[in-house]
């Protein structure tokens, strides 16, 4: 992230959810509030900027000179699947976990996620903790004030820089209850952090989480960082986020992920590859959306001991 500035990628992923909720006839993830974070001027500004990325993703189509709406739709087809499928997976997993008795939801790197404002019924059972970089969190909170959205009673904001503060310490200084099992989502963040920060955060989270707690996160596989193997749209995405000051630096090998998580106190119970995500969320769609190459999601549970 650029020093002192809110995360550019958090704005982009919120825009993606807004665009999808407005335009999709059969939404993969229906964030009905995302668009309200943006003024009409901001929506137009982001739409124009995103449409202009067509040249980076698909120079041949860009060269045909499509109008802005067409270019934007094409860019969304290529970029939105990562955000939409991971959010869908996380909230479906969360709902199942709540049915199993979970009482707390921690969003690491929450960005402009709207869960706490959208799922007001669930907040009757859940206490929600949004942990994010202070600059992004301050931006979100300013925008909420401008919108006149009151914070739900059970929503708690906890500023953190994962590079300098442990999740356990941050949660200790909040009203998080370590004796109550918690569901944590960590979406769109692991690849932007150094490996030791990702591992340290997962270890710290395990230490702060009661038995029966769960974590869901998405990650890039190692081929995403191999110039010989990386898929074109991932190459373009990485070039763009690098230019925005948020370079992707960390990936995992799916075949050794279970062992790495076990060493940190987590039992992997589900790992979905791009092919799995394609089957689960994109098969049969007629809008041309397909699962993003190299992007996986994982779900793990806090062990009973250790
Ligand atoms: C791509 S956004 C994802 C936001 C949200 N989870 C979503 O899916 O839309 C990345 C998020 O990670 C946060 N982030 C990046 N580096 C961070 C750090 N060192 N400490 C805390 N948060 C960080 C940013 O503030 C931002 O909210």
Image: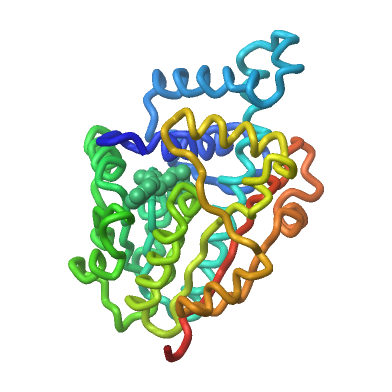
Front residue (pair 68, 190): 190
Front residue (pair 167, 89): 167
Which residue is outermost to the top? 65
Which residue is outermost to the bottom? 305
On the question of residue 27 being in view, the answer is: yes
Q: Residue 65 falls in which quadrant of the image?
A: top right
Q: Residue 35 falls in which quadrant of the image?
A: top left
On the question of residue 152 being in view, the answer is: no
| Residue 198 on image: x %, y % | 44, 60
Residue, x 50% and y 34% (percent of image)?
241
| Residue 187 on image: x %, y % | 49, 53
| Residue 271 on image: x %, y % | 65, 67
Residue, x 57% and y 63% (percent of image)?
92
In the rendered image, the quadrant that contains the N terminus is: top left
Q: Along the horizontal axis of the image, is 250 left or right of 42?
A: right
Residue, x 57% and y 54% (percent of image)?
251
């Amino acid at each position: 992230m650029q020093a002192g500035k809110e995360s550019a990628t958090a704005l982009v992923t919120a825009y993606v959810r807004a665009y999808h909720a407005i335009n999709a006839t059969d939404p993969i993830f229906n964030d009905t509030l995302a668009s309200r974070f943006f003024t009409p001027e901001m929506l137009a500004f982001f739409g124009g900027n995103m449409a202009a990325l067509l040249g980076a993703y698909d120079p041949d189509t860009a060269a045909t000179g499509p109008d802005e709406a067409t270019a934007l739709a094409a860019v969304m087809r290529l970029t939105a699947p990562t955000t939409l499928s991971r959010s869908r997976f996380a909230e479906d997993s969360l709902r199942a976990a709540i049915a199993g008795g979970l009482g707390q939801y921690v969003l690491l790197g929450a960005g402009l996620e709207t869960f706490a404002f959208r799922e007001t019924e669930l907040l009757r059972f859940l206490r929600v903790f949004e942990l994010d970089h202070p600059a992004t969190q301050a931006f979100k909170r300013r925008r909420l004030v401008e919108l006149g959205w009151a914070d739900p009673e059970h929503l708690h904001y906890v500023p953190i820089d994962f590079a300098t503060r442990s999740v356990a310490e941050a949660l200790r200084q909040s009203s998080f209850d370590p004796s109550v099992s918690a569901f944590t989502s960590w979406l769109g963040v692991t690849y932007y952090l150094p490996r030791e920060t990702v591992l340290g955060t997962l270890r710290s989270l395990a230490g702060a989480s009661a038995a029966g707690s769960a974590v869901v996160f998405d990650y890039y596989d190692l081929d995403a960082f191999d110039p010989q193997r990386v898929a074109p749209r991932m190459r373009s995405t990485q070039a763009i986020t690098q230019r925005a000051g948020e370079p992707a630096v960390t990936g995992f090998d799916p075949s050794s992920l279970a062992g790495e998580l076990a060493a940190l106190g987590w039992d992997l119970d589900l790992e979905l590859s791009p092919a799995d995500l394609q089957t689960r969320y994109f098969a049969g769609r007629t809008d041309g959306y397909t699962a993003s190459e190299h992007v996986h999601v994982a779900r793990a549970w806090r062990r009973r001991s250790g």
